[in-house]
């Protein structure tokens, strides 16, 4: 078995904890290492989550970062910090190191649905939005899912930092490296619901986030990954407003979970897919 040597930069957080838990369950070839700040709290709760750690500060420990990147097949950039200027400076440092040290690695940059907040907030945040308040019988027709081709249109610093990560993924892609941006939906440690308006439409189970990363890596390995792409990473939610059909078609992404299992009490509901 050929090992897949993966480095998660910021892998002790919620998204990284899910990847460390589910990637090896999808394929035991994954050997996952997490690079994090010394003493940072590990969000993984599953005793089977991989726990190989490297202590470093990606915002300033350039030599240690470059050493950690050596020989990697897959790099997932998850780390973040405040304020925006420091976050973007860290992103510059990380992507320059990736470009120099492991240009053959598949790179997944951590973006968010918030990178395109201005394009979907009307459906999910407006006071009168029937979708936001689960008055679905008032929605006819259902809005066309927001295309993965939608360019960044952030409404705040969090979205701006994610758009900056996307720009770096595009830059690496233009230089010939397999790099994509993951527009993560709502991922949480318990894979449950949150008291957050419209969370049911952005919800993403940790297993589905891992299915996305696995699909990206294996599509790249087969020479078929569209470089510089940005994809929404959402579970197969019935009341979804994001395009995951393109992600299915292009990389074979197959989410297994539906937010209605926890919001509506029924996991047998029919998905409002456009295929």
Image (cartoon, grey):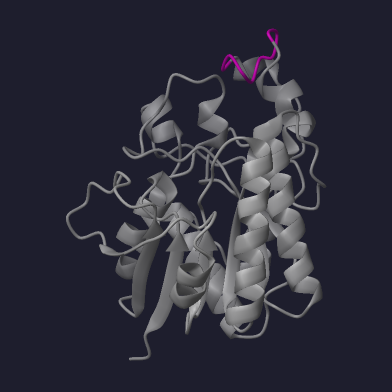
Tell me if residue 103 comes above or below residue 249 in the rendering: below
Residue 10 seen anywhere in this rendered image of the structure: yes
Query: Residue at point 58% right, 32% down?
Result: 239
Which of the image's four quarters has the N terminus? bottom left
Indicate the quadrant where residue 33 lies. Answer: bottom left
Which residue shows up at 34% across the image and 40% down it? 189
Q: Residue at x 37, y 52 (%)?
A: 18
- Position of 66 with respect to 223 (left or right) is left
Per the image, is 133 magenta?
yes
Percent from the top left, x then y, of residue 203? Answer: 50, 37
Q: Nearer the viewer, residue 81 or 121?
A: 81
Q: Which SS type dominates the magenta stretch?
A: loop
Q: Where are the magenta residues, as a range?
A: 127-134
Residue at coordinates 77% horizontally, 38% vertically from top-left? 144
Q: Is residue 182 visible to us here?
A: no
Q: Position of residue 248 (x, y in %)?
A: 62, 61
- Residue extending furthest top? 128
Q: Is residue 61 magenta?
A: no
* 141 sits left or right of 23 in the view: right
How many callouts does the rendering have?
A: 0
Looking at the image, residue 46 lies above or below residue 6? above
Q: Which is nearer the eye, 259 or 136?
A: 259
Looking at the image, residue 163 sits to the left or right of residue 24; the answer is: right
């Amino acid at each position: 078995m050929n090992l897949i040597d993966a480095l998660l930069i910021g892998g002790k957080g919620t998204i990284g904890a899910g990847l460390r838990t589910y990637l090896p369950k999808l394929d035991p070839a994954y050997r996952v290492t997490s690079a994090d700040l010394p003493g940072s709290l590990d969000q993984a709760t599953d005793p089977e989550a991989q726990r190989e750690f490297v202590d470093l500060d990606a915002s300033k420990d350039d030599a240690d970062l470059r050493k950690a990147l050596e020989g990697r097949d897959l790099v997932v950039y998850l780390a973040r910090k405040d304020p925006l200027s420091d976050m973007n400076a860290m992103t510059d440092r990380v992507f320059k190191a990736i470009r120099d040290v492991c240009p053959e690695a598949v790179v997944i940059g951590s973006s968010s649905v918030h990178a395109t907040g201005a394009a979907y907030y009307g459906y999910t945040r407006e006071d009168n939005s029937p979708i936001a308040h689960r008055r679905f019988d008032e929605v006819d027709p259902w809005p066309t899912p927001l295309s993965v081709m939608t360019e960044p249109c952030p409404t705040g610093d969090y979205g701006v930092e994610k758009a900056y990560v996307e720009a770096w993924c595009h830059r690496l892609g233009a230089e010939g490296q397999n790099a994509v941006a993951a527009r993560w939906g709502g991922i949480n440690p318990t894979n449950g619901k949150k008291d957050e308006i419209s969370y049911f439409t952005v919800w993403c189970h940790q297993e589905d986030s891992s299915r996305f990363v696995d699909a990206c890596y294996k599509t790249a390995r087969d020479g078929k990954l569209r470089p510089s792409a940005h994809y929404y990473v959402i579970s197969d939610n019935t009341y979804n407003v994001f395009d995951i059909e393109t992600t299915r078609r292009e990389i074979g992404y197959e989410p297994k979970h539906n937010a209605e299992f926890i919001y509506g009490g029924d996991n047998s509901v029919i998905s409002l897919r456009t295929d």
